[in-house]
Amino acid sequence: MSNSENSKRIVKNTLALYFRQIITMVVALFTSRIVLQTLGVTDYGINNVVGGVVAMFGFLSNTLMVITQRFISVELGKGGDIVVLQKIFSTSMILHIGACVIVFILAETIGLWFLNNKLVIPAERMVAANWVYQFAVFGFLLSLLNAPLTALIISHEDMHIYGYMGIFDVVVRLLTVYLLVIINADKLIFLALFGFAVTCVVWLFYFIYCRRKYQEAKFSFVYDKSLLKELSGFGGYVFIASIFMVLNIYGINIMLNMFFGPAINAARGLSASVNAALISFGNNFKQALSPQLLKSYTQNNPEYMWNLCERGTRMLYFLFFIFSVPLLLETDFILKLWLSEVPEYTAIFTKLIIIDVLIGGLFWALGNINNATGNIKTYYSIGYISSILVLLLSYF
């Protein structure tokens, strides 16, 4: 495929993803307001911080998906030997199953103890908080098993599938809001239960799609010591970087809860919704660009790779910039328009998180090129040090 055709494919995939994202973002912001009003500040904060405890294990999913996508994209760049691709996919699934076992043990021991003994949650809401936690744990385990399937779709650049999932996401969010308003049961528990049910449906959809679409999406128990070592060696640095990133994000969230209570988590949770909306715009572009960066490196086409890196970084930053500047200039007005009743500190959290997104957008493409080379020790070590400093300074 020529560079021109590759560029057209990137544009086509990006447009498909952005059409989906604009719709889902509008619906997400609307539903966040209704969920806040329906649950109340305390329950909204509980949902945010309890979900954060489980999400701390999310680094496993992100790490393993990055590893899988990298190796599949590189192999596709070489020509796409089905036998090798099947071996990579099966080895990746074995790693994910192992990760599920580790997460389950940690979540049902340390995580459960932390929830019931360290988090600041009103006594009358502890039962609901434990239900939310269990649904979040099992939902996460399914999401973890879904990561290799997502990596396959991204590596093959079949981004139209995200359009279908975008429609599904919109329908689910609107249905969630409707049911929350009319249901008489505990709304916090229902929200967690419904979220878990949706995760089950999403996993089933990806599983069926990948099984029918890709020959390599057939799991078999494969023990290839050299491949397992290569996957684990590459993943080690990504894994540690993900741990520190999670500690940075959710560790601060938990510290806020321990020092200030669940109300402050509601404020940070709302700012995180804004962050998620901005990041999702960037992620759509990243998903369309990442496979081409990896493949161009594998095909020994550095001129196209660096050209793509430069143009990609400019476009990504421009996308962040045009959405971020109005939010920074009119934060209070926009939050009031969105939420009507704005929890204290939401505005300052939102401004800080937007600045963080703008800074991070400058470095993404370079990280992908580092992943392509496999020489990631120095790059990720800098990330470790930064995350540790942020966490320590936040604590003091």
Image (cartoon, rainbow, N blue to C red):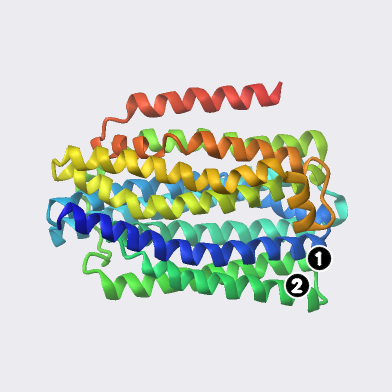
Q: Is residue 123 toward the left or the right of residue 235 in the image?
A: right
Q: How many marks?
A: 2
Instruction: Work out whether 252 lies above or below 337.
Output: above
Mark with earlier residue (2, 1): 1
**Percent position of residue 1, x then y:** 15, 58
Whether residue 121 is visible:
yes
* Residue underneath mark 1: 38
- Mark 1 neighbour density, 10 Å: few (under 14) some (14–19) many (20 or more): some
Q: In terms of image quadrants, where is residue 390? A: top right
Quarter of the figure with the C terminus: top right
Q: In terms of image quadrants, where is residue 259? A: top right
Q: Residue at x 35, y 55 (%)?
A: 288
* Residue underneath mark 2: 180
Q: Of 4 and 293, which appears nearest the observer?
A: 4
Q: Is residue 229 toward the left or the right of residue 276 in the image?
A: left
Whether residue 246 is visible:
no
Q: Give the residue type that dot 2 points to.
A: Leu
Q: Is residue 49 toward the left or the right of residue 106 in the image?
A: right
**Percent position of residue 246, x then y:** 55, 39
- Disc 2 and disc 1 in contact, CB within 8 angstroms: yes
**Percent position of residue 176, x then y:** 68, 72
